[in-house]
């Protein structure tokens, strides 16, 4: 009678007649009274023991059948279409060949685990090799007075470089380089660790050092501070017309408008002072006074070039004004205007010595009454021919006049032959009185009567 061989699910594998053998599967299936039954059965048992170990997969496998692939030294199971690894990982130094998706490989050289994606082995972990030692992120729990804190520690070559934490705390167990841990990213203080690269924002800057890393990476100590006195060795440029503001109330400003620069003291009625150190003594040679808008100067003033004054020039000291120049020029603008010297008096107008440009002569006077100052060139030695002129003696010492009136009588002293004064009528009368005091007569007739000492001048008609 024929045998019907069924699989676990009830489906028929084969029907074997008496005295025959079926080879449609990986093992031999015997019919009733098959003569080679014993040898075939034993071979079937051996195949089951070794899981059909060989370089080639069984030719007629059944779903669920095992095969030990001697090419990869892996136990594989048939899934109905192909043999797939049954599980576990290959632990060896070389990357396995003929792998299937999902295969695991333990790299014994680097002590790392890989998974086969179907095209290549992908590292599962750890990210560092055994020779590199612990490197990368490691999740740790650190004790603190506020309870245990879960942090992410970053290692490099088995050294903790930084700790990432969601809160600030102080570990109760000493952590080398981390006396306290801040919320955020804390670097190991024993390494001198720094952030290197580009940063768009920072809350603080370390100003303890001044050694620059490069021409573009500048130490914090080389930046000017706004909260304390500081010094710069470079030029300071304020690239805005709003300029410079100084003082707690911004009393001093330096601004620019249309390329014009304005230096201003903005506090009402306050001064702008310029001081110097003169032998250890602070002096103020120049003050711009806010109360009256004037300029006060102390000390000597040296001017190279012209001094142009449009207002009044006041000299309040009792000392004499001295000028080393040969000439003192006024009205230097070239316009035709009277110019000269004014002396203040109590009159309606001051006393003046000036050049009258309308008359083309020098004039002097006071209280708005001025007359010409006579020069030697304005005088003449002949008053008879040049009336109404100022006279001078001729080269011979003479003086010519039409007439001359003398206000003083004068006197004549008997015996005085050296007196060169011009005799007045009074002096001549006095001269006559010296001869007796009587009337003296000059006539063409003879005298009548007389006294002793009289004399009479008689001339022919």
Image (spheres, rainbow, N blue to C red):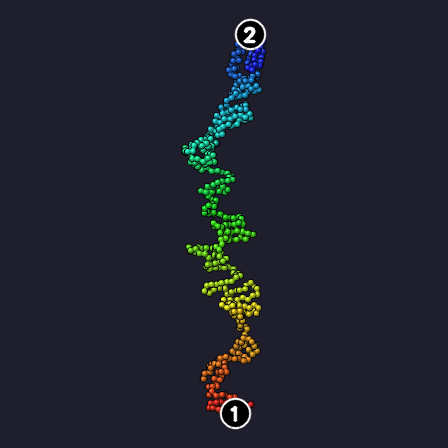
Residue found at x 52% / y 80%? 405
Instruction: Give the labeled residue for mark 2.
Output: 33
C-alpha separation, residue under disc 1 versus residue under disc 2 = 232 Å
| Kind of element beneath mark 2 | loop
Q: How many marks?
A: 2
* Residue 90 seen in render: no
| Kind of element beneath mark 1 | loop
Q: Is 351 situated above or below 222?
A: below
Instruction: Give the labeled residue for mark 1.
Output: 446
Q: Is 149 situated above or below 77?
A: below
The residue nearer to you, when weighing 360 against 377, is 360
Residue found at x 55% / y 19%? 78
Residue 1, position as x, y percentages in the image:
58, 7
Residue 215, position as x, y percentages in the image:
50, 42
Q: Residues within 10 Å of mark 1 (few under 14, many from 20)?
A: few
Residue 73, position as x, y percentages in the image:
51, 20
Q: Earlier in the sequence, mark 1 or mark 2?
A: 2
Which mark is drawn over residue 333?
Answer: none
Residue lying at the far left of the rendered structure = 173
* Residue 275 seen in render: yes
Q: Report if the CB atoms under discs 1 and 2 are less than 8 Å apart.
A: no
Q: Residues within 10 Å of mark 2 (few under 14, many from 20)?
A: few
Residue found at x 52% / y 88%? 442
Which of labels 1 and 2 is toward the front?
A: 1
Pick the quarter of the image with the C terminus.
Answer: bottom right
């Amino acid at each position: 009678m024929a045998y019907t061989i069924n699989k676990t699910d009830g489906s028929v594998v084969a029907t074997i007649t008496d005295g025959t053998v079926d080879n449609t599967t990986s093992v031999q299936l015997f019919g009733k009274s098959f003569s080679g039954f014993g040898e075939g059965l034993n071979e079937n048992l051996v195949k089951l023991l070794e899981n059909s170990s060989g370089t080639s997969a069984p030719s007629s496998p059944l779903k669920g059948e095992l095969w030990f692939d001697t090419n990869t030294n892996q136990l594989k199971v048939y899934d109905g279409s192909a043999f797939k690894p049954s599980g576990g990982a290959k632990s060896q130094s070389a990357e396995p060949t003929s792998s299937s998706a999902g295969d695991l490989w333990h790299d014994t050289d680097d002590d790392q685990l890989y998974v086969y994606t179907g095209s290549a082995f992908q590292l599962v972990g750890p990210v560092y090799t055994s020779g590199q030692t612990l490197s990368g992120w490691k999740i740790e729990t650190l004790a603190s007075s506020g309870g245990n804190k879960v942090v992410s520690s970053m290692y490099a070559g088995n050294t903790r470089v930084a700790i990432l934490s969601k809160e600030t705390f102080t570990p109760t167990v000493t952590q080398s380089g981390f006396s306290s841990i801040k919320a955020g990213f804390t670097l190991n203080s024993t390494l001198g660790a720094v952030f290197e690269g580009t940063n768009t924002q920072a809350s603080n800057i370390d100003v303890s050092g001044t050694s620059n890393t490069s021409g573009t990476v500048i130490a914090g100590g080389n930046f000017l501070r706004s909260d304390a006195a500081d010094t710069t060795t470079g030029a300071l440029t304020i690239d805005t017309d709003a300029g410079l503001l100084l003082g707690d109330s911004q009393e001093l400003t330096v601004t620019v408008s249309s390329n014009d620069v304005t230096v201003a003291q903005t506090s009402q009625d306050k001064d702008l002072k310029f001081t110097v150190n003169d032998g250890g003594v602070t002096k103020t040679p120049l003050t711009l006074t806010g109360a009256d808008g004037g300029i006060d100067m102390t000390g000597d003033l040296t001017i190279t070039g012209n001094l142009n004054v449009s207002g009044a020039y006041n000299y309040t000291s009792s000392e004499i004004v001295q000028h080393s120049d040969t000439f003192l020029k006024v009205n230097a603008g070239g316009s035709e205007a009277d110019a000269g010297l004014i002396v203040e008096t109590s009159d309606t107008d001051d006393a003046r010595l000036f050049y009258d440009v309308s008359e083309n002569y020098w004039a002097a006077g006071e209280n708005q009454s001025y007359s010409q100052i006579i020069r030697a060139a304005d005088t003449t030695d002949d008053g008879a021919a040049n009336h109404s002129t100022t006279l001078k003696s001729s080269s011979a010492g003479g003086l010519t006049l039409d007439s001359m009136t003398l206000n003083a009588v004068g006197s004549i002293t008997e015996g005085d032959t050296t007196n060169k004064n011009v005799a007045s009528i009074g002096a001549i009368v006095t001269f006559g009185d010296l001869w007796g005091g009587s009337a003296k007569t000059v006539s063409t007739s003879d005298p009548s009567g007389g006294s002793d000492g009289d004399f009479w001048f008689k001339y022919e008609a």
